[in-house]
Amino acid sequence: MSKRRGELFLLDIVVAAAKIEETRAFHASAEEMKFHYQHWDSVIREFEIVGEATKHLLQMGWLDAQEKRVVDFRNLIVHYYFGIDAEAVDEVIKTHLPPFVERVKARFLACPKPIRQEALQWAMQEYAHIKSVKKALENLKGETP
């Protein structure tokens, strides 16, 4: 089990999702994204991070068991290599990722305020250079009671 704080795993997911959505926005279609190998590899890597962070959060009891499907998706993309279906990944980006991120944000907002503030401060410093991530974190900060 990781000794890393759960709040940081939650922010890992928020950050990775922002990167995925920003990268997807560069392309008219999923197939176009797949053939731009840097963007495709980036999206796949960020999904690996989402899945790994989710696995740790499940082990810690921070997320509901239903979220295991996120880990299953991570395992699928890690082991299929070049057989990953671009349309399936795009469907996850458009349909499944946004509500999952909202549940993650809600879990983050349930954390004690001083810990949330500390985690957000760290993430804002770490990712200030990435506009989409900075915006996602600022939105989360604005939601923090």
Image (tube, rainbow, N blue to C red):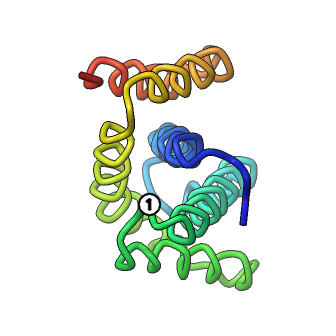
Q: Amino acid at mark 1?
A: Trp
Vertically, is 134 above or below 85?
Answer: above
Residue receiving disc 1: 62
Q: Position of residue 88 (x, y in %)?
A: 45, 75
User: The residue tagged with tag 1: helix, strand or loop?
Assistant: loop
Q: Position of residue 54 (x, y in %)?
A: 53, 63
Q: Position of residue 60 (x, y in %)?
A: 54, 64
Q: Nearer the viewer, residue 65 or 15?
A: 65
Q: Residue at x 39, y 78 (%)?
A: 65
Please say whether residue 138 is visible from this viewpoint.
yes
Query: Around disc 1, counting alpha carbons within 10 Å, would you say few (fewer than 14), some (14 to 19), or many (20 or more)?
Result: some
Res 100 → quadrant:
bottom left
Quarter holding the C terminus is top left
Quarter holding the N terminus is bottom right
Q: Residue at x 73, y 52 (%)?
A: 3
Q: Position of residue 77 (x, y in %)?
A: 64, 76
Q: Nearer the viewer, residue 1 or 122?
A: 1
Vertically, is 66 above or below 122?
Answer: below
Please say whether residue 26 is visible from this viewpoint.
no
Vertically, is 52 above or below 69?
Answer: above
Q: Nearer the viewer, residue 134 or 66?
A: 66
Q: Residue at x 38, y 39 (%)?
A: 111
Q: Residue at x 72, y 76 (%)?
A: 78
Q: Is residue 71 left or right of residue 104?
A: right
Vertically, is 53 above or below 115?
Answer: below
